[in-house]
Amino acid sequence: MSRRRLELFLTSRRNIAGTAMAVVGLGLLAVGLTSGVVGVGIVAGLYAIGFLAARPETGLRLSLFETDDASQIRSGLERLLSSIRFRVSDDVYQRVGAIAYEIVQTLPTNGRDLDATDPNVNIIRQTALNYLPQALDAYLAIPRIYAERRQVSGDKTPHDILMEQLNLMADKMRETADDIARNDTERLLVNARFLQERFANNSLEPAVPANTGAPSEDRHIV
């Protein structure tokens, strides 16, 4: 077993849970409630119980299906945040929340699907459905103690590497959201200019009848 694999095993939930149970068995030996081969067997048995009872590290366990439905994407992001709440550090959770917020702000709220032909919309869609879940999935498969303390790339831990990815996504989502807002504003201004030009020479006041003045001088009163 390589050093890295050994470290992953030692810091895994299952080994930690098994070790905690084994300590209980050692305590029984220490106080004389068990002894000899039976006591050692109990220690081993308790370790096995703790090891098997603990849930192993898994990825995100969340499938965001390929979709253009804004409501499904919004619901998927809510489930994503809920699923990582107690599995990551606060800075990771807050950064993911910020990314999700930027994405949600760009989603249509009137029941329309996303316009996947728009490059800005497409990058937001791909971030929500692929880039963000994949980054979290890879990170959550690593034992948390190992991920937050073990340097794996220069002086960077898996936690540091994940934060770099999240910061990059957060910056891109803010930039993309700003681009979408500018495009929407430009469309509004274009429409306003069109209306101004369209109605510039057309009076909306009702026409005044031509014969509203005094009676003609050649009209006789009988």
Image (cartoon, rainbow, N blue to C red):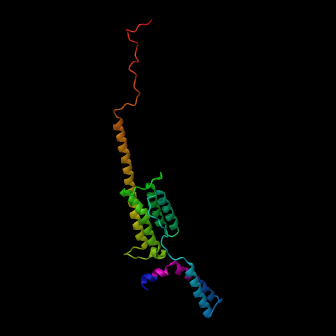
- Name the foreground residue: 104 vs 113: 113
Residue positioned 61% across, 90% down in the render: 39
Q: Main secondary structure of the magenta part?
A: helix
In reply to whether residue 11 is colored magenta, the answer given is yes
Residue 203, position as x, y percentages in the image: 37, 30
Quadrant including the C terminus:
top left
Residue positioned 41% across, 63% down in the render: 127
Question: Which residue of the protein is positioned furthest toward the right in this rendering?
Answer: 33
Question: Which residue of the protein is positioned furthest toward the bottom in this rendering?
Answer: 36
Magenta span of residues: 7-21
Q: Quadrant of residue 171?
A: bottom left
- Name the foreground residue: 163 vs 71: 71
Q: Relative to 19, is 174 above or below? A: above
In reply to whether residue 74 is colored magenta, the answer given is no
Residue 26 appears in the figure? no
Residue positioned 46% across, 81% down in the render: 7
Q: Is 209 left or right of 12, judged from the image as shown?
A: left
- Name the foreground residue: 16 vs 73: 73
Residue positioned 47% across, 62% down in the render: 97
Q: Relative to 70, is 132 above or below? A: below
Residue 175, position as x, y percentages in the image: 37, 57
